[in-house]
Image (spheres, helix red, strand yellow):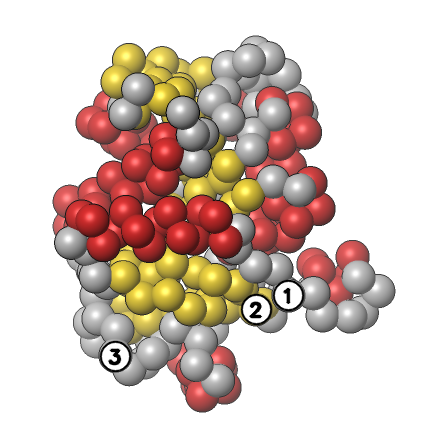
Amino acid sequence: MSLHLDATPGSYAPSLLLPGDPLRAQRIADGLLQGAQRVNERRAAYGFTGSYGGKPVSIQSTGMGMPSMSIYATELVVDYGARFLLRIGTCGALHPGLKVGDLILATAASTDSAMNRRTFGGADFAPAADFGLLRLAWERAQARGLQVRVGTVVTSDDFYGPAESMAVWSEHGVLAVEMETSALYTVAARHRVAALSILTVSDVIGGTAIMHPDDRERSLTPMAELALEVAAAAQGG
């Protein structure tokens, strides 16, 4: 048990999916995991453990933003022995070639947050995905016939910031903006574990296209299935 999770020791599998929304975590557990059992409900941040492809896999909701992701990812690694962390979430497209529903594998995450600068004495740290998970996700996506884009994202603290503030990121080839990946990759680097963000485009920054909330669960299923397959395969055997 940790400060923010009430799961007992051994409750979590080595591989975890990390959605932000606790209800999304529950829907994935109910619909895609075999034998799923709820292992955490403290702060209504639901966590589940079951199996997928014959391997134990857990799902833990993390809330929104870098501080929340950093807390949950750290406790999952330090207190529960997590080794493979896969964020599944939505993002806003910055690249003109992206549209609503597209999948992104995030190779690295820039950020406008001050969290890492505080840690690194004012210097910029470049947190990146684990190559093994990235390669697995790419290969499994191809096998499933999924079209995925691979590239960098930017993790922002400001959900309702002006679209104009995102222009410089787009000019430098950043694919999308979201709110957690930089924190996840930093925690993974600090504790020498593997992490990857798999994202679905839910809107286009500066445009009118947006994924309706009622369509999200159906539209996000390919991302969840891909992440579960990677989570199971990462354990080998």
Distance CA(mark 2)–CA(mark 3): 20 Å
Q: Secondary structure at mark 3?
A: loop
- Residue situated in front as seen by the camera: 131 or 112: 131
Q: Is residue 195 above or below residue 43?
A: below
Residue 72 screen position, x and y as percent? 58, 36
Quadrant, the C terminus = top left
Label 1: few (<14), some or many (≥20) within 10 Å?
few
Residue 8 at what x, y percent from top left? Answer: 57, 11
- Percent x, y for residue 202? 27, 61
Report the disc number at residue 180.
Answer: none
Q: Earlier in the sequence, mark 3 or mark 1?
A: 3
Q: Earlier in the sequence, mark 2 or mark 1?
A: 2
Label 2 packing within 10 angstroms: few (<14), some (14-19), many (20+) = many
Position above or below: 160 against 95: above
Q: Which residue is mark 2?
A: 110
Foreground label between 2 and 1: 1
Task: Decide which of 128, 165 is in the foreground and name it.
Answer: 128
Q: Secondary structure at mark 1?
A: loop
Q: Quadrant location of residue 217?
A: top left
Secondary structure under tag 2 reads strand
Horizontal side of 90 relative to 67 (left or right) equals left
- Report whether 172 appears left or right of 124: left
Please tell me the numbered disc located at residue 126: 1
Q: Where 139 falls versus 204 (above or below)? A: above
Relative placement, left or right, of 91 versus 194 is left
Which quarter of the rendered picture does the N terminus lie within?
Answer: top right
Q: Which residue is located at x 21 percent, y 61 percent?
A: 147
- Identified at 80% across, 61% down, the residue is 120
